Image (tube, grey):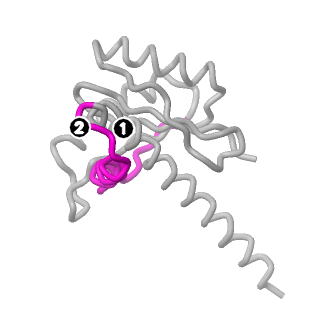
Amino acid sequence: MRGRILAIDFGMKRLGLAISDPLGITAQGLATRTRTRVDDDLQHLRRLVNENSVERVIVGNPLSQAGGETAMSRQVAAFVGKLARQLPCPVELWDERLTTAQAMRVLRASGIGIEKRRQASDRVSAVLLLQSYLDFLTNQQSRKSSQRTEQP
């Protein structure tokens, strides 16, 4: 059994948030945090981690399409550094390329209006980010299990 994981879709105006279920299988969206001051944002995240017994935090890393650093990824890295000093659990960056575009496609397909789409996009991005991380962990575990059973 895995501990709960919190995912953050970092933005200059909002933080999209999602958390895994207690078994670490699915991602559920949390209320989007409208950003105020960095210290207030860090305090809010520390409270979420403590209240939900989070064992790991992942933060979307907005790399370029080629996988290189961007101005935004540098800002995210600086935020992650501050966050890691505030939390009792590991904080890591997770590649979020295409997550926002995928979130907008999902929301467009749902048929909701533009304003509600805008409001939901950060949360949906965080859910997609976390689900990709959870799927990665599951695939890694499956690979390890199959390697153990294949060995004589």
Residue matched to label 1: 9
In the displayed structure, would residue 52 be above or below residue 6? above
Dot 1 falls on a residue whose secondary structure is strand
Question: Mark on residue 114?
Answer: 2
**Magenta-span inclusion, residue 33:** no
Residue at the location (68% across, 69% down)? 142
Q: Nearer the viewer's eye, disc 2 or disc 1? A: 2
Q: Position of residue 33 (x, y in %)?
A: 37, 22
Identity, as a three-letter code, of the amino acid under mark 2: Ile
Q: Kindly tell me whether residue 29 is visible in this rendering.
A: yes
Question: Residue visible at 44% across and 32% down?
Answer: 17
Q: Point out the stretch of residues depicted in magenta.
A: 90-115
> Which amino acid type corresponds to the residue marked 1 in the rendered image?
Asp
Neighbour tally class for label 2: few under 14, some 14-19, many 20 plus, Cα within 10 Å: few
Q: Are marks 2 and 1 in contact (CB under 8 Å)?
A: no
Tell me the CA gap for discs 2 and 1: 20 Å
Q: Earlier in the sequence, mark 2 or mark 1?
A: 1
Q: Is residue 96 visible?
A: no
